[in-house]
Image (spheres, coloured by chain):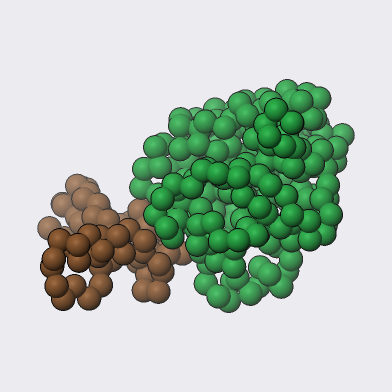
Chain colours: A brown, B green
Amino acid sequence: MKLRIIVTLKPGVLDPQGKAIHKALDGLGFAGVEDVRQGKLIELDVADDTDDATIDAMCRKLLANTVIENYRVERA
Amino acid sequence: MKAAVIVFPGSNCDRDLAVAIREIGGTAPTMVWHGDSDLPDDLGLIAVPGGFSYGDYLRSGAMAARSPIMRAVSDAAARGVPVLGVCNGFQVLTEAGLLPGALMRNAGIDFVCRDVALTVDNTQSLFTSGYDAGETITVPVAHHDGNYFADDATLDRLEGEGRVAFRYAEGVNGSARNIAGLLNADGNVLGMMPHPERRIEAAHGGSDGRRLFEGLLAKVLA
């Protein structure tokens, strides 16, 4: 079973990398970019019988730092 | 009592810390590899060094915090063994949950490598008793992810409990409330981004970091 874990900074947490990307897009002349936030995509290939609680534990214990990040799981 | 320095793949200040402990404390520390699961007995201090453990993969300190030796470090910290984390060591301690909050990418994005002025906020702790209250010292920083973050309620609580050990005298990396070094609730764990071990003798350009080790080692290695 293929999973995509999307990790994003919580709203309100400063994202200097997103800001730099935003500036670069402005510099390239792309108008109308309101905001940029950078996150991470982690692809997992796990056994088909892996339950939701285990996947959630993987996210909380390692893949995301829940002090600063949110995560969501997509099944490919 | 002895000291131990934890060594991860990618640590690069482990020997600097070992030299500081040996020169100032009089006894060389035991170097402990991250893959070990046990610490030596009778430890008076565990030092978690700076560097780029595991190449900063995933998040700075994230992989190191889950390495086998960190379970033993957490157990020791819970028993009251003093733990000092410097730079990447501070990041590892927050990722391991031994200190609250997180260290994020510097607000200005750049890697910051220079001397900074620090104010000693708490001189009552095990680690900072060698300093005078409100004293300003100069110690180098060298980091990309030193921007301390915690929510406002946590920051208020930390300040109220006197757990901010050091603050940047001026903005360096965007750290919340200019926090540069932080104590745990019991006062036996200190994490700090600046490098006191790089400033222990005149040949380093100053010795403001030396008094941290003098005050600490006299108590914990006795």
- Quarter assignment of residue A29: bottom left
Closer to the camera in the image, B42 or B211: B211
Across and down, in percent, residue B203 comes to: 70, 28
Across and down, in percent, residue B198 comes to: 64, 35
Q: Residue B219 vs residue A53: left or right?
A: right
At x 66% / y 52%, what residue is drawn? B117
Q: Quadrant of the N terminus of chain B?
A: top right
- Quarter assignment of residue B209: top right
Across and down, in percent, residue B52 comes to: 45, 38
Q: Residue B93 vs residue B167: left or right?
A: left
At x 65% / y 60%, what residue is drawn? B169
Closer to the camera in the image, A19 or B39: A19
Vertical comparison of B91 with A22: above or below:
above
Vertical comparison of B208 with B184: above or below:
above
Vertical comparison of B79 with B10: above or below:
below
Q: Residue B151 vs residue A57: left or right?
A: right
At x 63% / y 58%, what residue is drawn? B168
At x 66% / y 44%, what residue is drawn? B139
